Image (cartoon, coloured by chain):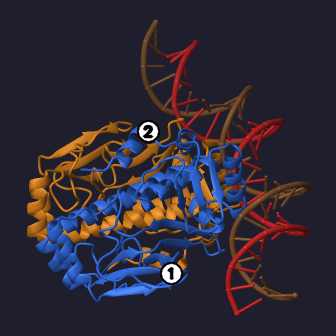
Chain colours: A blue, B orange, C brown, D red
Amino acid sequence: MHQTSDCAGLSERHRPVGLGLGSDAHSAFCALIDGHRMERRAGTIITLEGEGEGDGNGDGTVYFVLSGWLISSKSTLDGHRQIVDVMLPGDSLDPGSAGGDMSAIEIQALTDTTLAVIEGRDWTRLLNQHPDIGRAVNRAGKAATWRMCERMLRLGKGSAESIIAFTLCELCLRSTDHGLIAGRKFHIPMTQQQLGDLCGLSAVHVCRTLRRLERNGILTVTDHMDIVVDDLDTLTEIAEIDPDTLRQEIIPAA
Amino acid sequence: MHQTSDCAGLSERHRPVGLGLGSDAHSAFCALIDGHRMERRAGTIITLEGEGEGDGNGDGTVYFVLSGWLISSKSTLDGHRQIVDVMLPGDSLDPGSAGGDMSAIEIQALTDTTLAVIEGRDWTRLLNQHPDIGRAVNRAGKAATWRMCERMLRLGKGSAESIIAFTLCELCLRSTDHGLIAGRKFHIPMTQQQLGDLCGLSAVHVCRTLRRLERNGILTVTDHMDIVVDDLDTLTEIAEIDPDTLRQEIIPAA
DNA sequence: CGAACGATTGAATTTTGTCAACGTGGGTGG
DNA sequence: CCACCCACGTTGACAAAATTCAATCGTTCG
């Protein structure tokens, strides 16, 4: 019932940060991860081998998401939680950087998940042989930082409608292979509570906001987060997404 | 009246992310930046040579803060602004990563500022000769991500008191060479409006919150952001700073 | 069937933003 | 030197936004 052969996630990966590798680099990658995978069930909290001194340039073990959705989050002492980022197939988890033991970041599987585990030694070797892989991973890392900045902007200022609209747009763009288009259904494997933890809102307010968007004919939410965008223009306007940036995201990159 | 000779900022740098370089690496660095500096006055908006394809591993031009305070911020179309990070001496600006033209991040000098400009070629060569520099910069980059995560946590959930207390603690730790201790005065070169843009609050509410903290005997604010912590325990409690993490930050690292 | 979880909704409360007014201090130009 | 201005901080009153508490409903799972 699980995936049959090689590196799903990097080949089936979609637009935004597709690690667009050349075929030789790609096959080298596939050869390397063969037999080095981790499977985790939905809901599991994932512990990575943190091993103190991994400095993204090599040495530390690196993890890649092959399938499934993951979140990384932090919690305050009084029980509140903030989801820092959502990770999809093609993204990497660098313990000590995005995740890991430092500063109590917790990584959790939203769905059943497959990870590729690459030892520091192998990773360094691969980087030397295929510099484009390093570049691709770097680009992905920057995209993650960019996402965090955008989310911060809407967390700080910006209404509940704004950040929810933005988050839905972002997750649609990243998780589907059609872009952000009206009328097409996509699914987000999160509860309203989790969406609230991501957007800095209470679950109740997420619910209210979604229903208001629905009442205003902007989107339709059915059956646990199946979402259809009805009025794309208004949605991006609420999300305060810069049309130019959006176009850049949508048009398949070179 | 400006600094007389070599790389201030890296030598005078303090604890948290001090780019603790060995003396040979340090002198190589100083030799390289000699004659490659940019000076900017307080308030200036700084444009970096973005040049599309700088992938933190080399090639792109890299900038280092030698002296002064900088902020990087994003703005929504309707005029609201969010400060994403504050950069102090010792930090690096990698256009395209933390800053740069992509996605309309704006970099501004809070005080008079000196930057070191290192061309991609030179930077690559330096990295090859002194791998520890690369490691140090990487570590600094991770510290920046960590800061952003912490700030996100308090932006999303967390009261105004919490994020302000946290921000003050962070800036004190990063900008002074004594740690976070009671009774010692330090200065933050920001207006309440800017502090609000950093904390996701209105200037008015920043003012109210500061005065409440002062009324409760937790700190003293005088004369445009000269700050003295009076009750450190309560302050860190409000900031929801994990005591263990804090200790790690305070104790000079190996 | 019962239990548990998630979604939905209303009502009361708290937090924060907005608007407006005022004071103050540091500059600038006369 | 003085008058003036302007940016910043401070405060109050009010409005808007979001949280909390609580009750209800539908589904799913054992």
Q: Amino acid at mark 2?
A: Pro
Q: Quadrant of the N terminus of chain B?
A: top left
Mark carried by residue B49: none
Q: Amino acid at mark 1?
A: Asp
Mark carried by residue A243: 2
Q: Pointer 2 indicates a residue of which chain?
A: A
Q: Are marks 1 and 2 on the same chain?
A: no
SS label for mark 2: helix
Q: Which residue is drawn at the image coordinates 61% and 67% (left, top)? A: B235
SS label for mark 1: helix
Q: Is residue A190 above or below residue A180?
A: below
Question: C7 or A127, which lies in front?
Answer: C7
How much space separates mark 1 and mark 2, taking CA atoms? 44 Å
Question: A177 or B210, which lies in front?
Answer: A177
Q: Quadrant of residue B233?
A: bottom right
Q: Is residue B239 above or below residue B199?
A: below
Q: Quadrant of residue A225?
A: bottom right
Name the residue carrying label 1: B244
Q: Which residue is drawn at the image coordinates 30% and 70% (left, top)? A: A10
